[in-house]
Amino acid sequence: MRLLFTQERSLRMLKREIESVSSINFVGVRRLLAMKVYTVEEYGHPSRHVMVLCDKNMGKLECHCNFWKIQGFPCKHMFFVMKLEHLLAIHGSVVLKRWTKEAKSLEAYVVKTDDGGDRGFLLRHGALHSTSRWLFFLGAQQVGLFTSALEGIRRLCATVESEFAKGVHPTRSKACGEIRDPIFIRRKGAPKRHKRKASKRKCSKYNKLGHTKRTCVEGRPQKGKGPDRMSWIWNKLTRDNAMR
């Protein structure tokens, strides 16, 4: 976990969701082609059903509570399904990049475009196919949803066909590869501060470098100059006796 997440707060919230898996009960499961639709419920709320979609082949995991879209990591319902499917690792598609170690990687801010070739076609085709599967699932639930979804798909097909007939504008294709300023990510810990240059020792009395006021020799009588102490005491005693 610590190799994937960077902030301690997100790690604590993730552990809380993992510990809440014990409060989830299994209701049922359905299979749609390679995708499984799990229906679960929380302890204490038997009438509140939550659907979780799981596709191990595509590495796709979605939950209707939308917790993972807001917080950026899986919810307790998704962890419950991961336990049933015996998944050993958290897939990168359900973790936002801002919580990972790759948040400051330059590759995350460069949009790679590949307009030509079979590789780009297969990548775009797979992305559209995985996105449309959820639309097909919802549209097949009711007759009204099926009609509105079918009409929307037909209108979208007509729009895409007209755009394809006109061709792609060259300025739009170049704008996709533009490198923009990266998003500022604040990491844990106190902000770094620049160290101040150490000032040299200076005398506060004469404002000179190399010594302090206590060790200053300016203004003090130097050795070998001035009256001797013993002669000064003798002269003082002589003056006192003369005054008597």
Image (tube, rainbow, N blue to C red):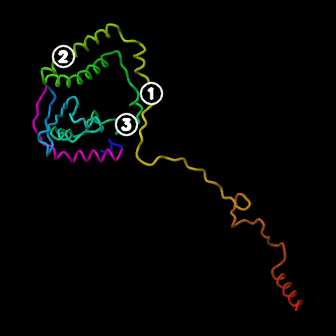
Residue contact at pointers 1 and 2, CB within 8 angstroms: no
Q: Residue at x 37, y 36 (%)?
A: 102
Q: CA distance from mark 1 to mark 2?
A: 38 Å
Residue at the spot of label 3: 102
Q: Residue at x 47, y 46 (%)?
A: 191
What kind of residue is marked 1? Arg
In the displayed structure, does residue 130 sit left or right of residue 96? Answer: left
Q: Which residues are magenta?
A: 7-32
Quarter assignment of residue 120: top left
Is most of the magenta stretch helix, strand or loop? helix
What kind of residue is marked 3? Glu
What kind of residue is marked 2? Leu
Residue at the spot of label 1: 180
Q: Earlier in the sequence, mark 2 or mark 3?
A: 3
| Secondary structure of the residue carrying numbered label 1 | loop
Can you say whether 230 is above or below 215 in the image?
Answer: below
Badge 3: how crowded within 10 Å, few (<14), some, or many (20+)? some
